[in-house]
Image (cartoon, rainbow, N blue to C red):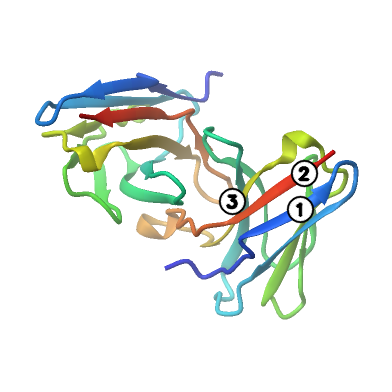
Amino acid sequence: DAKTTQPPSMDCAEGRAANLPCNHSTISGNEYVYWYRQIHSQGPQYIIHGLKNNETNEMASLIITEDRKSSTLILPHATLRDTAVYYCIALPLPYGGSQGNLIFGKGTKLSVKP
Amino acid sequence: NAGVTQTPKFQVLKTGQSMTLQCAQDMNHEYMSWYRQDPGMGLRLIHYSVGAGITDQGEVPNGYNVSRSTTEDFPLRLLSAAPSQTSVYFCASSYGFAYGYTFGSGTRLTVV
């Protein structure tokens, strides 16, 4: 079972920041938080991951609370092309065997509106 | 680099037929896996491999076989297709520690 919970859907206005929350109150100390997204009918796309420090890359920022019980993925200037289902997944690192497999929940469907 | 290549993109099978979905990656990734996604649902793991010659079952392995004779290729075989196997199939690969998975564009399979 997924160790994370996410709201089923969210809306965001184009050009505004999209803040997608994820609760992971039961993850272990060695489990990273990964974010993927799936644009309609395409394969999932890796976005970002982190352990306890905030992370930023060209796609997004990841803010993890100090107690590691929740995190927020931030798309700073959402566009219509960011409309997708976003998945938050806990994964231990380093991983071996079955530990490396992604377990997808239902994710959050983000709709970016003009 | 081509990334993860899946063929075919679309396939229609009759019940009882067998076929192989192909997956190839050119990134020298050790980890490879197969997922299926049914309408309105998340992805479910079918089989995975942590390296050439090593495979194992995922959440929904029944009706599927895999093999991993090379690092690059991870084919998924449907032994006797059933309508319940109508789905979109995604192949994914990963280098391992601290890297995300790269997914293919999917194979849309219909079993009639």
> Mark 2 or mark 1, which has the lower sequence index?
1
Q: CA distance from mark 3 to mark 1?
A: 31 Å
Q: Dot 2: what SS?
A: strand
Percent coordinates x, y for residue B8 in the rendering: 35, 19
Disc 3 versus disc 2: nearer the observer: 2
Residue beneath the point at 46% across and 58% down: A95
For disc 1, the chain is: A
For disc 2, the chain is: A
The numbered mark at residue A11 is 1
In this rendering, do the residues under marks 3 and 2 share a single chain? no
Tell me if A44 is positioned left or right of B14 in this view: right
Percent coordinates x, y for residue B12 in the rendering: 26, 22
Q: Nearer the viewer, residue B20 or A11?
A: A11
Pointer 2 residue: A112
Q: Exactly how many numbered labels are in the figure?
A: 3
Residue beneath the point at 78% across and 47% down: A60
In this rendering, the answer to whether B15 lies above or below A103 is: above
Question: In the rendered image, which quarter contains the C terminus of chain B?
Answer: top left
Residue beneath the point at 74% across and 34% down: A81
Disc 3 versus disc 1: nearer the observer: 1
Pointer 3 residue: B98
| Residue type marked 3 | Ala
Q: Nearer the viewer, residue B27 or A108?
A: A108
Q: Dot 3: what SS?
A: loop
Tell me if A29 is positioned left or right of B64 in this view: right
In this rendering, do the residues under marks 3 and 1 share a single chain? no
